[in-house]
């Protein structure tokens, strides 16, 4: 009897709750209080976490502009922007907020623009109400119903072109209960650029519609340009910090395989939503989508952030850095403990010295340079880059390199035996590891002659016999 009565009480309670929710859905919602102006930030900064425990009316002002900015060293591009930079400014609101959105198009713009925020429930995500001609402003309002990290972008025709030119950013709708506190929050957004010239070709590069339709970008970058977040512009943290990255992918075409080399994401809010995955190496970020990743940095060092579709990282610019400072923690990572020579029977560098049957032998310096260019593309360009410009802070430049040009024999030694430890190139310190390359004397002579006479370098010819001398240790 008792048992029956208990079940009956439970059922009645459940039924009552269901009835209340069904008849009075508004009971669950909070009352809007006051209003405030949103503070927006440029990448990689993120606005401070929301501390209020009630929804408010949030006023957002965002300006569209068309500006010429650096895309890579020596390469400029006319970016179309939300807030003057690519990606667009980061917006942070709270679940339940009423957002009053003011979109202003600068009078100098040549194009009309609008905004489609994926956080909006309504036609076009706001695009239908925000078409804004140059020198005009529009206003629309929406309720931030669903918590999550959302992409926004321009949706004015031709839509692909407006996005390809840089018109995207992120809006975070914080859940009512807030996000757990962390030590550092950063904003990182990937996107591609389609330029008339190939990667690294100097000058102001116009947009190439043909390449965009074929989805063959020349540049894949984080935060709007090659090297935007490397060297002294790297993200920073201290050993022990808990990091949260708000990651977006503006596309317009490619899906990102987002990865931090030497870290494991403790938590991932997959696709920027509410489902959490744990212990993730690489998270997929769709075009027009996002991800929130969290991890604690346990050891010091430079952690390279890449799209693990890896040619994009080393040949198209999709490379950023997180610099972690603090004391080493050898229990977690020892660093290099030992190094020795390893020469298996009949193998190693000696076996490659001299010429092989049918090997190419250059008869003139021009032939040497032409063959050297092919060897460079196959063996050297991935790190030192196609135009010899290197990657700031990681791979030293060969173009205009005092280290290279002042001592060709030393350069030959580096190619033959590899080079590690601290060096200085044009006043900048590098401390990397270059592996020795398995090339014959003829091939080393060709590639060095090419490098010493390319990228603006003016040098002499290096001959196979000079290389043989270096290899012999003379
Ligand atoms: Cu636009």
Image: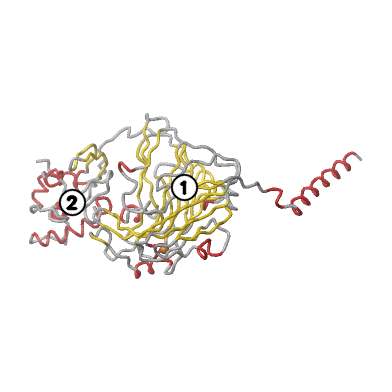
Viewer-side residue, 211 vs 109: 109
Residue 339 image point, x, y percent: 28, 35
Separation of residues labelled 2 and 1 (CA atoms) = 36 Å
Q: Residue at x 14, y 45 (%)?
A: 402
Quadrant of picture, ligand 1? bottom left
Mark 2 = which residue?
A: 399
Tell me residue 404's x, y (percent).
15, 46
**Residue drawn at 18 percent across, 51 percent down:** 399
Which structural element holds mark 2?
Answer: loop
Q: Position of residue 104 (x, y in %)?
A: 43, 58
Q: Residue at x 9, y 45 (%)?
A: 469
> Where in the figure is residue 465, as x and y percent of width and height?
8, 50
Q: Quadrant of the rendered structure where residue 327 is?
A: top left
| Label 2 CB-ligand 1 distance < 8 A | no
- Secondary structure found at label 1: strand
Label 1 lies in ligand 1 vicinity (Cβ under 8 Å): no
229 in relation to 168, above or below = above
């Amino acid at each position: 009897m008792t048992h029956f009565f208990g079940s009956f009480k439970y059922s009645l309670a459940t039924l009552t709750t269901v009835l209340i929710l069904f008849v009075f859905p508004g009971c669950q919602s909070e009352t809007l209080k006051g209003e405030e102006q949103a503070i927006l930030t440029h990448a990689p900064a993120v606005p401070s976490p929301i501390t209020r425990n009630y929804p408010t009316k949030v006023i957002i002002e965002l300006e569209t502009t068309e500006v010429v900015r650096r895309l890579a060293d020596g390469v400029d591009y006319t970016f179309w922007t939300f807030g003057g930079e690519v990606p667009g400014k980061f917006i942070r609101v709270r679940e339940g907020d009423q957002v009053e959105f003011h979109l202003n198009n600068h009078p100098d713009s040549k194009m009309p623009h609008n905004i489609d925020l994926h956080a909006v429930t309504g036609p076009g995500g706001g695009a239908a109400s925000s078409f804004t001609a140059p020198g005009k402003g529009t206003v629309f309002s929406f309720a931030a119903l669903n918590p999550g990290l959302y992409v926004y972008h321009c949706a004015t025709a031709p839509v692909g072109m407006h996005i390809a030119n840089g018109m995207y950013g992120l809006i975070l709708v914080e859940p009512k209960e807030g996000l757990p506190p962390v030590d550092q929050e950063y904003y990182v957004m990937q996107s591609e650029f389609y330029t008339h010239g190939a990667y690294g070709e100097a000058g102001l590069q116009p947009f190439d519609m043909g390449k965009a339709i074929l989805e063959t970008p020349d540049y894949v970058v984080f935060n709007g340009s090659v090297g935007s977040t490397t060297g002294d512009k790297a993200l920073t943290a201290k050993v022990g910090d808990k990091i949260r990255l708000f990651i977006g992918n503006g596309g317009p075409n490619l899906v990102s395989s987002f990865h931090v080399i030497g870290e494991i994401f403790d938590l991932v809010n997959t696709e920027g939503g509410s489902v959490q995955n744990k212990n993730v190496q690489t998270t997929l970020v769709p075009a027009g989508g996002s991800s929130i990743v969290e991890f604690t940095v346990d050891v010091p060092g430079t952690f390279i952030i890449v799209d693990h579709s890896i040619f994009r990282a080393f040949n198209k610019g999709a490379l950023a850095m997180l610099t972690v400072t603090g004391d080493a923690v050898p229990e977690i990572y020892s660093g290099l403990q030992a190094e020795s020579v390893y020469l298996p029977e009949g193998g190693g560098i000696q076996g490659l010295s001299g010429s092989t049957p049918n090997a190419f032998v250059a008869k003139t310096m021009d032939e040497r340079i032409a063959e050297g260019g092919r060897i460079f593309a196959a063996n050297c360009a991935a790190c030192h880059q196609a135009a010899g410009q290197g990657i700031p802070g990681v791979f030293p430049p060969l173009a205009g390199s005092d280290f290279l040009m002042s001592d060709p024999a030393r350069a030959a030694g580096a190619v033959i035996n590899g080079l590690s430890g601290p060096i200085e190139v044009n006043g900048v310190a590098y401390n990397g590891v270059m592996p020795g390359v398995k090339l014959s004397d003829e091939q080393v002579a060709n590639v060095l002659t090419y490098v010493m006479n390319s990228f603006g370098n003016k040098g002499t010819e290096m001959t196979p016999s000079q290389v043989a001398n270096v290899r012999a240790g003379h």
